[in-house]
Amino acid sequence: MKPTYYCLAFSVISGLSASLYGWQFWSITFLIVASLPHLKYLNYLRAWGSLFLYVMLMGICYIYGHYILESNISYLNGEETNFSARPLTEPRKTSSGRSLSFQAKLKHGEKIHVFLPYEEKTLKPALNDECKFKGKLSPPKTARNPYSFNYSSFLREQNIYWTVTINPNTLVCKEGNNNWLHTLKKWRSHAVYQLTYEKDEEASALIAALVFGDRSLFSEQRLNQFRQLGIIHLLAVSGLHIGLVTAVLYYLLYRIGMTREKAAYSVLAILPVYAIIAGGAPSVVRASLTCMFVILSVQFKWRFSLLDILSIVCITLLIINPFYLYHLGFQLSFLTSFSLLLSKRIFLNSSPFFSLLKVTGVAQLISLPLMLYHFFEISLLSLLINMLFIPFVSLWVLPISFITMFLQLLSPPAASFTYTLLSQSLKPVYMLVDIIAKWTWPQIVTGQPSEALLLAMIVSIILCLVLWEVQKKKWLAVVGCCSLLLVTLPIMLPYFNGKTTVTILDVGQGDAIVIELPYRNGVYLIDTGGVIRWEDDVNEVKEKTVAGGPGKNVIEPFLKAKGISHIDRLILTHGHLDHVGETCYLTEVLTIGDAFYPIAESVPQEAKNQLMCLHEKNIPIIQVEKGVSWNVDDDSFFIMHPHGDEIDENDRSIVLFAKLSGISFLFTGDLEEGGEKRLLTEYPALKVDILKVGHHGSGTSTREELLEQLKPKIGVISVGENNTFGHPHPDVLTRLENHQVTVFRTDIHGAITIEFEDNSSFTIDHYLK
């Protein structure tokens, strides 16, 4: 059997994966998959030759990947403060709205990511401007919690190793020398910017996404709705868009008198230009290159199948940028295209409606494992919603979006008319999206499947497609049930796990602790974290939580990746924002059984706002005091504090004593010296194995008397990296060391996970090694 292009592509993936991320599951899997079609032909010398070629290609790509890693290095040492650079991307506001963010290229060619503090009067650099500025270099932050976004890896895959925060008073820019590429990018940026002046933000955002591949005009809420309903892919410029552009261009050029050959070559020249206009994402480049290869194959009568062309494009892109390999858009684009090509006989002899239904079904099925791996949930209505939205977007929104932008160049009044048509047609659609997005019952949180389970899902779904194609209905039913079992397996596995787990998440300067009881008998969350911003407002200092805080970035992905969509009990230890600040957000994305809050004579205003969110969701709020207790099988919980007469907010903290698989754990909130003395007086025999050190290791907590009596073996400190409070205090660390307490800190170790065994033992692991 001769070598096949798709097996060559698998070999390239295997070699690059091994070089970039080490010999791991996927690098070995892809080499095996490349070899499988040839195993039954091992009696023939040609099959051995093919296998040898795959191994050789894998080795070459392994060496090439190492070469890329060694050449992608930084020439900065972190001490530089003066910079000359050209912006490579359009400056955009960050989620907090306090900075502009963009990529820039320094004079020596290295790329950096720039943050510019933003005010209305701030100078906003344009693409390719020649800028000089002073700033501070910082390495990009790595992920500090399981399942959180890894900003450092994200930038490293773009060959960026430093971020720079600019001193805005030092920024000076002048217009740079523009070539045709810079001019084209500036026109794209200007066209997107002009859309912001239109009266309908939703219509403008959709045009920007579909025509220019720019989602920045969408609100975060709308993007979350699309993601939740499984239609986020409709906003990506992909094969459908490129196919439409190619077909329309070819038809128009042919109709104005060009020969078929000249029209084809003209389209060939225009496609790379549109790929740049559409943002140059992997899906855009893949679709453009595929169309270009098809045109060339027809013109030169090359004997390539579409599967061959797709494989050649895949290899080409990975040679250009090996880091595309771990880009979700790249993965989904090629996996979906590969599956549709393998399943093409399924679509034969079907009406347009049933062809659309089948294509949508196949695309949804094959992309399901990757979506579960990256987003941990699925909507039961996803297929139905896609059946409604794909024709609407494909046959109406996409064409009229292109027509509107084309008319904007020729006749703005005509463009205004088509824009209004689009705007009016979108209103009922977005009303429907808003209604469906509020439904919680269709949304199933599955958790993140393991890599082995992910592969099993993909293989079983591909096998289903093969059996569907050859009409083996009985086997299709069997394999389909196996696929369904594999998809639901992450949901079921926690109900067979007999271990108790406590995870102290790294939410910066705050607390958020997740307790998972055996067999999913209960999930408790102690505090929510919350970022505090101090601002001067009419000469008064106010506390405000920051948009995109730890609720969204840390707690939600952690819980959903664990398959948790319901918190049985939310324990808010006291009313400071670094402990309760993400409550409102969590009520929107999770269901909560009840909430504990300390009994007190007064409640801080910032806590009232968060408690109101619980009230609006009809979540019972129970004000608790010393003496409240409950048991879940062999695990027991007892509230030792407060009494209700405390004055200081920190000393009102709920102190929870838990006995987990025979191990004692004391959660102290922000309890300070006064509260500690009262606790020791009332519980003179209290001993604990593990202590959550109070108030982030403040010098006013964890006094000598507390450690002397409790005699903890382990101390856990939840504290922000480089925090402005100087926590943990050196005196506290000294006291812990003197009492031979092994200390784990979130600012050093990231998230800390403690697993309790049935035999009164436990293991501790931390995310940062």
Image (cartoon, helix red, strand yellow):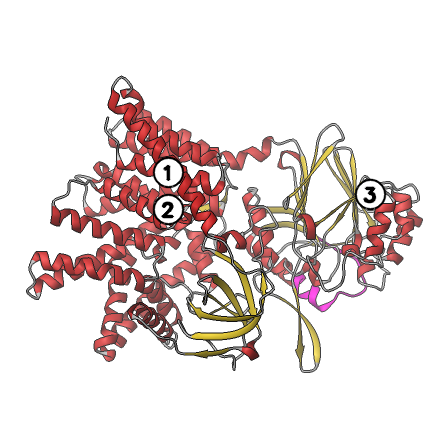
The residue at the point 67 percent across, 78 percent down is: 536
Q: Give how far apart the Cα atoms at labels 2 and 3 are.
A: 48 Å
> Could you tell me which residue is drawn at 46 percent across and 61 percent down?
110
Residue 62 horizontal/vertical position (percent)? 41, 39
Q: Quadrant of residue 235?
A: bottom left
Q: Looking at the image, which residue sits at the far top?
A: 43
- 2 or 3: tag closer to the N-terminus: 2
Q: Which of the two marks, 1 or 2, is nearer to us in this view? A: 1
Instruction: Indicate the amino acid at tag 3.
Output: Val
Which of pointers 3 and 1 lies earlier in the amino acid sequence?
A: 1
- The picture places residue 429, in percent across and down from the top left corner, at 35, 61
The residue at which mark 1 appears reads as: 60
Membership of 678 in magenta stretch: no
- Amino acid type, label 1: Ile
The magenta-colored residue range is 596-611
Residue at image mark 2:
332
**Of circles 3 and 1, which is in front?**
1
Distance of label 1 from label 2 (alpha carbons): 26 Å
- Tell me if residue 446 can be seen: yes
Q: Mark 3 points at which residue?
A: 741
Q: Disc 3 versus disc 1: distance between alpha carbons? A: 51 Å
Q: Earlier in the sequence, mark 1 or mark 2?
A: 1
Classify mark 3: helix, strand or loop.
loop
Q: Horizontal and vertical percent for residue 219?
A: 46, 65
The answer to whether 274 appears left or right of 764 in the picture is left
Image quadrant holding the N terminus, namely top left
Instruction: Name the secondary structure under disc 1.
Output: helix
